[in-house]
Image (cartoon, rainbow, N blue to C red):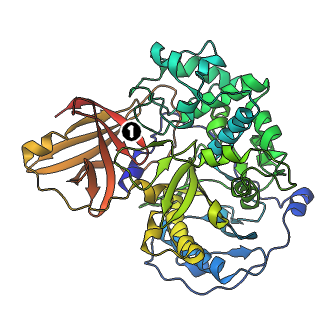
Amino acid sequence: MLAGTLSKMQTLRMPRRRLLAAAATATAAQVFSPWTTLSRPSATMQANPTSPWPDAESIPATYAGDPSPQFSAVADALMAAMAQNGVPGTALGILMDGREEHAVFGMADLDAGVEVAPETRFQIGSVGKTYTATAIMQLVAAGKIDLYAPVRTYLPGLRLQDESVAARVTVHHLMTHTSGWWGETFFDTGEGDDAISRLVEEVLPELPQHAPLGMFASYNNAATILLGRVLEVVEGKRYRDVIQDLTLDPLGMTYSTYDVTEVEARPYSLGYHSGPNGTVLQSPLHLPRSLEPAGGNFWSTTPEQLRFARLQLSDGMAPDGTRLLPAYTTQLMRRAQSSFSGVSAIQIGLIWFVQEVGGIRFATHIGDTFGQHTTLIVAPDRGFALVLLTNAEPGGGAAAGAVLAAAARTYLGMGEEAALVGVSGGSSFASDTTPLQLSSSELSKYAGRFATPVDAINLRVEDDQLLISIEALEMAGYISDDVSSDPVVDYPVSVIRGDRLAVGSNMVASFIRKPDGEIGWIRTSVRSSPRVSAG
């Protein structure tokens, strides 16, 4: 989809190791009970000649026990989407009314022929932000952090490009993505214990302030990394140790880790780019340690992610009955705090994306690394949770959309509104995508260049048609993937009601206006870019 072409472009390549083909160690074998390979009904979908799978029936599938009819239906939808979108491997876990079901599909390493196993770890990416938020709320409940206090309460030396923002930005701003500065902090500050502090001290002061503090939500990795540094300072230990002590250990998540050495000692999945030219190996696989609070290098499995999901379903109770969070904190995390311009079907809570669809309240988050995609969603009022781990992008995101829609229909009895469930569906919804009949002069008001340090969106008018182009920009030291989507050049888009853009019947962007009425920003998905020139 168009928004997917805004993925980060390469400025620095990093080597990565191949997946270890060795079988799981005895410790890993004890974690995962025997799984079985089952036959399944065929799923029909138009064939994709560039996919590693000629059809859904060719995908290896292993289930934990006998799957329910509901789980089988979602699994069939997943395999059809894998074949259609060129996804080599996935892992699926669903929890409903206390019953957990799990399955793994496809390949962790295409070249080596290594299948995804129950113990295969995937990267959960930005889903890891919800762990950062959980730890923050644990310390809020303990009286160690004030959600509405300035960040300088905990980091007196905080420096940002805008001094007034540095003085006023609060923990709540960081938790709601409303800090206003550019936040794609894909920079390597080393693998030492000071990686996060170095990023905060050396990189954050250089990030441009793109919007007024608190004006609107725009997804921000740097803000979550800053939260991670707050955790380190308040608790006096490394970020990964804070998460281990506050969340992973109490939940019994013994197989989830930030440790690359531990990951490479046992089965884990490679990452792939799936596109018109086929499914190809993507790099880098491991991300810099400085990105840990934003979800970098957090590896896990579906059983362990559902352990974490249960914390939301139980409003803060660990499996052994220990209360890790007061109920009001988890409920506050799932309550809308801010919104994205032009979006009506999803809002931002405290890190979690929240929405109400068909009378059902959801909290969800997605994670994208270089070649892997994760979706985690919970509906506490219905006792429902789902996690999907995939090893391809953008195909993994497309597969997640198909899985969420199938699960919403099958488990929750939803109809057409099932397509709105999740970040992708919620952020691209418009009730009316009928193009407005605008003259060239009217269209020209939307034209201009919208840019961040690493990409730019150019809109221009030609023959009464608005055209969009997306340009990659280079930034010294910025780490990105080595395989990117094909460029978009002069692609026709339509202006629809609500200052929004659509391609056909799909809403792909919206505009944000300044107080004086002039267009100031363009939003794609949940990120915004400032207008740097008009016309």
Residue denoted by label 1? 528
Q: Is residue 121 above or below residue 64?
A: above
Which image quadrant: the C terminus?
Answer: top left
Residue at 60% across, 79% down: 58
The quarter holding residue 268 reads bottom right
Assign a secondary structure to mark 1. Answer: strand
Seen at 77% across and 40% down, the residue is 259
- The picture quadrant where one finds residue 193 is top right
Residue at 48% over, 71% down: 84
Q: Nearer the viewer, residue 290 or 343?
A: 343
Q: Depth check: give the residue in front, 478 or 244.
A: 244
Q: Amino acid at mark 1?
A: Ser
Measuring from the top left, give residue 142's x and y in whole percent.
77, 32
* Count of all numbered marks drawn on residues in the image: 1
Position of 345 with respect to 172 (left or right) is: left
* CA neighbours of label 1 inside 10 A, class few (<14), some (14 to 19), many (20+): many
Q: Position of residue 95 (x, y in %)?
A: 70, 67
